[in-house]
Amino acid sequence: MPTDKKMLMKGVRYMATALPFMFIGPVVIHSAFKNQGHPFFIPVLGLAVITCIFSVFMAFKGINTIIKSLFDS
């Protein structure tokens, strides 16, 4: 059963996209909660939550694509 290398690389690209956002999101959330009195607290917190959700979505999509490349015929 051969591996679809193009699809595998696409999945690795998705995972590489998710990796920096996995670190950026929690750091920005922590920074937002340290500055709760600042007027931009809510927009920064919203951006951080969206970043974390995007990271989870891209990681799921990457793992799903890698699994498809390995096991689909």
Image (cartoon, rainbow, N blue to C red):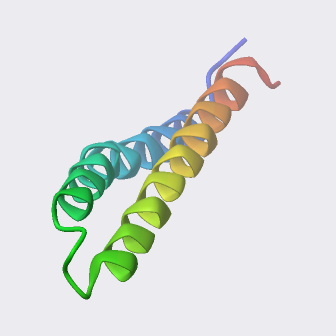
Q: Is residue 71 left or right of residue 39?
A: right
Q: Quadrant of residue 16?
A: top left
Question: Does 59 appear above or below 51?
Answer: above
Q: Residue at x 53, y 44 (%)?
A: 56
| Quarter containing the N terminus | top right
- Foreground residue among 13 and 40: 40
Question: Does 67 appear above or below 21?
Answer: above
* Residue 34 coordinates in the image, percent (x, y): 17, 58
* Residue 58 coordinates in the image, percent (x, y): 53, 49
Farthest right residue in view: 73
- Foreground residue among 64 and 20: 20
- Foreground residue among 42 and 72: 42
Q: Is residue 3 left or right of residue 48?
A: right
Q: Residue at x 30, y 76 (%)?
A: 41
Farthest top residue in view: 1
Q: Residue at x 18, y 58 (%)?
A: 31
Q: Residue at x 39, y 72 (%)?
A: 47
Farthest front residue in view: 37
Question: Does 42 appear above or below 66?
Answer: below
| Quarter containing the C terminus | top right
* Residue 39 coordinates in the image, percent (x, y): 25, 88
